[in-house]
Image (spheres, helix red, strand yellow):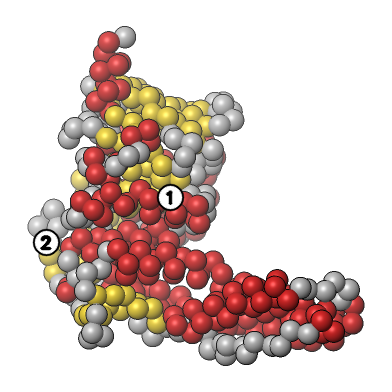
Amino acid sequence: MLIGIKIEKLFDIFDYDIEFKKEGITILTGPNGYGKTTVLKILDALASQNGFFFVRLLFKKIVLEFSDKNTITLDKKNSDEVLITNSNLKKTMCFNNNSLEKILRDLPFDRKDENSWIDHLTGEIYDTRRLLSKVIHKFPEFAEELHQFGLSEILKQMPAVYFISEQRLLRPVPDTRRNYEFNQYGERAEFINTIEEYAKEFSDNITKETFARELAQVSQELDSSFPRRLFEQKQDISEDEFNQRFDIVKKTQRKLNEYGLANIKEDNHPTYKKEISKALHVYINDAEKKLSIFSELLKKLEIFTHTLNVSRLTFKYIAISKENGFKFFTDKGKPLATSDLSSGEQQEVVLLYELLFKVKAGTLVLIDEPELSLHVVWQKQFLDDLFKIIELQKISIVVATHSPQIINNHWDLTVDLEELRDAAISK
C-alpha cells in the first residue's frame, strides 16, 4: 500500500514530505505555483509507467514509500536522464530522451516535439502518456518489451491510478463527428461532451444483457434445486424476520423496475404460517440471492441519483434508463439537453459518474480542483459525499484544491505545501 511521497527540489525549489491520510482522503493545499497538480501528475505518470514524464520534469529526487517499507526512488542525474530504483528488487533502470525512440523503433510514431508524437499513418497527435496507453492496448507485444525494459517490474507495486483532471466536461475524440476546436499546435481537434459520452457508455453497459444472463443462470440453478433444498431445510424463520427481509426484497424489486434495469415482477406478500416457515425461509433466501446480482449497481445508482436529485440539480432531475443511460428533465417532466445544465451541475454529474462507475476497488483516485464551478454549499458537501463513495468503492483519494469550503471541517486531512516548504527551509 502506498503511504507517502517525498520530493526533493521540485522545480528546483520545493522539498515535500507528503504522508497520505489513513482516512482515505488526502487534501493538498497551497498557493498557485507550489506544484499541487504536479504531485498528482507524478503519481499518474508512475502508475501509467510513463518514465519519460520525469525526463522533462525539473526535480532532484522522488521517493515513494509503501507500507511494507519498500521504496521506489527516482533520481534525476542530469537534465535528460532519470534513474528509477526499487529497493526490494535492488534493480535500477535509466530513462533518457532516447529511451522511447528505442522502444518504439518499429512502430509508426515519430516525435513531434518534447512531449508530443505523431502517428504518421493517421496524422493523430499524442502526448507521451496517451501514446504509451494506446501502444500497449494496440500492440500487446509492446507491453512485453516494456517489461523487458524493466519499468513494469520496478513499478509493479504502484496502485492503479485514476486521474480526474480539471478539464472534465469536454473530451477529445479521434474522429470527426462533432464540434471542432483548435489544439495547442494550431491543428483542428474535436471535443465531445463528457456527460453525453457517459450516458451512452452507461446505456451500452447495462444493455449488454450481462445481468439478465446472470439472473437467468442463478434462477435456473435455484429453481431446479428448490425441491431438494426444501426437504433438507431444518431451520425455521420467524414472522418478524421474514417480514423484514421480504420488505427489503420488495424495495429492491421496485428499484430495479424504477431504473428500468430488469423486468422483475414484484412478489405478492405471502401469508406467514408457522407450518410453512421452513419453506418461507428457503423462498426468501432464494429471492435475496437472485437480487444480490444487482446489489452493487443499485448502491451506486442510489448515491448517484440521490446526491444529484436531492441536493444538486435545481428544478430538474436525472432519470436512469436502459435506452438512454441517463437523461435530465424539468420538475414538470419535460426533457432537458445537457447544455441546459449549469456548468456546476455538469461538473457534479461527471465527478460522481467517474467515481462511482469508472473507478475500480483499490484504485488511487486523483482529483484536481473539484471546486470548479461549484456553489459554496456544494463545495462544503463534497467531502461528505466522498466518504460515502470511499466506503462503497474501497478506494483512496488525493485531492488538490484551493478551496477552504471543500475542506470545510476536515482540516486534519490537509497537507499544506506552503507549510511543508517553510518547514524544509527552517531546518
Question: Residue 201, position in %: x, y?
Answer: 38, 73
Spatial CA span between label 2 and label 1:
38 Å
Give the crowd class for mark 2: few <14, some 14-19, many >=20 residues within 10 Å. few
**Disc 2 on helix, strand or loop?**
strand
Residue 138 seen in render: no
Q: Earlier in the sequence, mark 2 or mark 1?
A: 2
Left or right of 236: which side holds 152? left
Residue position for label 2: 182
User: Is 396 rendered above or below residue 216?
Assistant: above
User: Is 395 rendered above or below residue 315?
Assistant: above
Amino acid type at mark 2:
Phe
Q: Are marks 2 and 1 in contact (CB under 8 Å)?
A: no
Amino acid type at mark 1:
Phe
**Disc 1 on helix, strand or loop?**
helix
Residue position for label 1: 387
As drawn, which residue projects farthest toward the top? 427
Residue at left 17%, top 35%?
A: 32
Question: Residue 273, position in %: x, y?
Answer: 78, 85
Residue at left 37%, top 42%?
A: 398
Name the mark on residue 56.
none
Dividing the picture into quadrants, the one containing residue 37 is top left
- Residue nearer the viewer, 100 or 4: 4
